[in-house]
Amino acid sequence: MSESAPPAGRPTQALHPDDENGEHAHSAVPYIVVYFALLFFTVLTYLTGKQHLGTWALPIALVIACTKSALVALIFMHLKDSSGSTRLVFGTSLVFVALLLFFTVADVATRFHPATPAGAPFGTERSQPEGLLEHELPE
Amino acid sequence: MRLSEADSHALAGAPAVPDYLHDGTTVMSWLNTRDHKRVGILFLVSVTFFFFVGGLFALLLRLKLLQPGPFFMDALSYNRLFTLHGIVMIFLFLIPAIPSAFGNFVLPLMLGARDVAFPRLNLLSWYLYLIGAAVALWGMIHGGADTGWTFYTPYSSTTPTQVAPILLGAFIIGFSSILTGLNFIVTVHTLRAPGLGWMRMPLFVWSAYATSVIQILATPVLAITLLIVTVERLGGFGLFDPARGGDPVLFQHMFWFYSHPAVYIMILPAMGVISETVCAFSRKNPFGYKAIAFSSLGIAFVGFFTWGHHLLVAGQSVFVGGAFGLLSMFVGIFTAIKVFNWVGTMYRGAISFKTPFAYICGFLYFLVFGGMTGVALATTSLDIHWHDTYFVVAHFHFIMVGASVMAFLAGLHYWFPKMFGKTYHEGFGLVAASLIILGFNATFIPQFLLGNFGMPRRYYQYPDHFQALNVASTAGATLLGFGFVIIVIYLGIALRWGSRSESNPWGSKGFEWLTDSPPPTHNFDEIPTITQMPHDYRTHEPSGVIRVT
Amino acid sequence: MSHEAEAGLPPGILAHHFSSLSRQNEAMRLGMWLFLATEILLFAGLFTGYAVYRFQFPEAFAECSRHLELTLGTVNTLVLITSSLTVALAIHYARNNRRHAAAVCLVITILFAFAFLGIKAVEYTAHFHERSLPGKYYAFEEVKIPGAAMFFSLYFLMTGLHGLHVIAGMVVLGFILRHTLQNRYSSRYYTGLELGGMYWHLVDMVWIFLYPLLYLI
């Protein structure tokens, strides 16, 4: 079969922006910087976590975690240099996680209170026997 | 009529290039194929087999329902059968059928590509499908689950029937679905032929793309939900079990977060097939290409915001239920846009009333009525009356069978010459289509009535005064079954003894028809540069037909 | 000459249906991000269960969290973050044609993964001994309020699934280590290595959320 082959001697045509072909050495400095930033944020979340800041504890922890994740995604995973479609994929997945979380928690938060879960009773036996159909099984 | 590539090869004195069906005829060449067309055929055979398995379960159920009291099988068997009917039809037929059978075959052809982005992952997708099916089958043979395909907890986490293998089977099949979706998205982004911008893609590709987005985002949530139920069965974790302080409604949230978008996985590819066939059999450009394309994305997106309408009477917050009901109305808007555009395409078209067009007519009727009953069901006040009755059963069968299966059959007949290079008997095609449309109405319209009169679904016994409608429904189901069997017979005959078809027997302007029928393994000698619009019938035809839109 | 040989690549890298290596790289990266999106949605289900039960039982969750080994959890966080650095460095060295440095970084990453699993094993053993176990096995004497067993059900599900992904990640790292030693990656082509690294970063990202949500309530 005849294929439209790339002209010989020009293998670098149509290279992606981050396929540099080694003409200039790629730098490791961003990775080191991000690493220390991640260490800093880990210490920060540890310290703020131990403060037991009440209602602010969860938002602060989540903001720090999101910042750390953003650093990992953008720099370690090269999302910063990636095409729009890959960034859209990542962003969209986060939107749908938020969607799932939002409606489900909203349901539990606004439900008729006796219909909310009771938490496990400390006695761990089930209140009903298991195997409801055992007596009906032919074998 | 233009010469096929094979004929022009022969004229030029070149050795004959075998088509993809004959390029390697050993079993291993099929089981180890990287060719998207062969993977499509493998899926087509598999999903057809399981369609009949699921259909057999349905006929057995309807047989029992001829009598209001105990008849032909006991209650536990009945529960197992409706569970398995749902599982087989949804996971082994509806979810994979159009994307993995037809999508795999035509998507690369429509994009001017030689294959999907990841051919080996494509083959893996088929093997995962088979392995998942085998695991679920093992569970079925050893008694099967009796929970309904929706596996509601705490029954599913405590019943002693074989739920775990079926959950595991569904989990594995989910990965098959994810891989297909992943492959399609990457193919559309990276393997379009030169000149084929997004706004020149055939409408089936838009639908397949939207479907793939749903497969990627929704299926993993099903996976984790089924995994948690399995762990609960084996380890007593209690997340969904109220006796251990858990929340059974939480299961329903997580289950339907997948399963509602899943119904759009089932219908969007069907809509894509309809878009293709409406244009081909009206010989007319699509009325509102952009509207049809973007409404596919709209359905995929908005479909994720509606799952709580399955929980309206489950104990969910009434406020959240109201929100979900309202959001559910919006999906109807996108579907309506499509229906108006299809009808607008047919208006003043040169209708060619072949078998695919008969299925298009059935599809439109069933989609509209099924869809409208869906919008009605999403209203809490009405759902209180209809929930868990046969009204719901009739609603989703109208869409899943009436619309989805009709579109599958339309695609099967439309692409039959493309896939196999053979012609089937048109008369039998129309007869089967008529039987199916008639039989379907006879099966499910009585069920709307039964549901409205209050007959619950998934019940082994029913009050005597519902018997007449049940008998009518069973009669319709038998007719429906006959229709499907007739299709298998005449298509089988066509495969074996049918006459050779032309490369483009429908005169369709779809890009996949630029290749031979059946196509060679490598699809194109030269990757084409696309300059024309998709579904463009505004040209001089040798037959003298001029279409101006 | 095959079109990949013309591009100056070792055989078996460029597939026949891609017109150029850059297209194929783009496809591989997009494919991997799509797969990672599915992993994110997979864990999202567990985070949803966590959100619901933490909302219902805030005191029980806080109390149980105080009984986790915070030091071990923090060390594990540092271990995973460092392993993310080492795998990023492995890719960096491969891009600069320093095959042996890349291989060393991958080995260190795998060792960190072992360390993570080892620390988790220590924690799980402690839970077995004090009977702070999921669902029906919960018999932890020190916390006896509703919701406590639910915390540990979620703890074991979330860290268990994460642990499975750590193991899967180690297998992936093993594969790309083997390919690195076989001289498959260079400045011309390192996408396979990059994809393996991306999976490992996802494993790290999930833990970045698990740590404060489980250990620091």
Image (spheres, coloured by chain):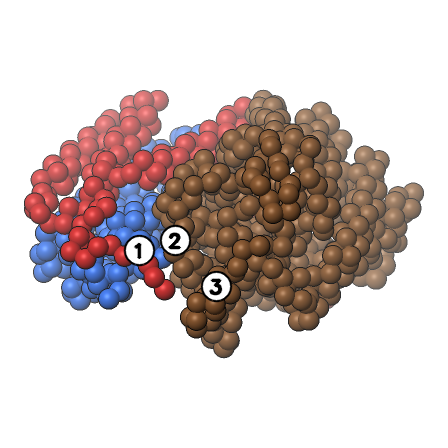
Foreground of the two, C21 or C89: C21
Regarding mark 3 in the picture, which secondary structure is present there?
Answer: helix
Q: Going from the N terminus, do you reach mark 2 or mark 3 first?
A: 3
Chain of the residue that carries numbered disc 1 in the rendered image: A
Foreground of the two, B355 or B380: B355
Residue underneath mark 2: B527
Question: Which colour denotes chain C?
Answer: blue
Residue B205 % position (x, y)? 50, 44
3 or 1: mark nearer the eye:
3
Dot 1 surroundings within 10 Å: few (below 14), some, or many (20 or more)?
Answer: few
Q: Can residue B78 be spotted in the picture?
A: no
User: Do marks 2 and 1 share a subunit?
Assistant: no
Q: Is residue C112 left or right of residue B502?
A: left
Q: Is residue B265 left or right of residue C195?
A: right
Question: Which colour denotes chain B?
Answer: brown
Q: Is residue C64 left or right of residue B470?
A: left
Q: CA distance from mark 2 to mark 3?
A: 17 Å
Residue C50 % position (x, y)? 42, 37
Residue underneath mark 3: B8
Dot 2 amino acid type = Ile
Q: CA distance from mark 3 to mark 1?
A: 20 Å
Foreground of the two, B176 or A16: A16
Residue underneath mark 1: A4
Chain of the residue that carries numbered disc 3 in the rendered image: B
Q: Are marks 2 and 1 in contact (CB under 8 Å)?
A: yes
2 or 3: mark nearer the eye:
3
Q: CA distance from mark 2 to mark 1?
A: 8 Å
Question: Which colour denotes chain A?
Answer: red
Q: Is residue A47 left or right of residue B236?
A: left
What quarter of the picture does the N terminus of chain B occupy? bottom right
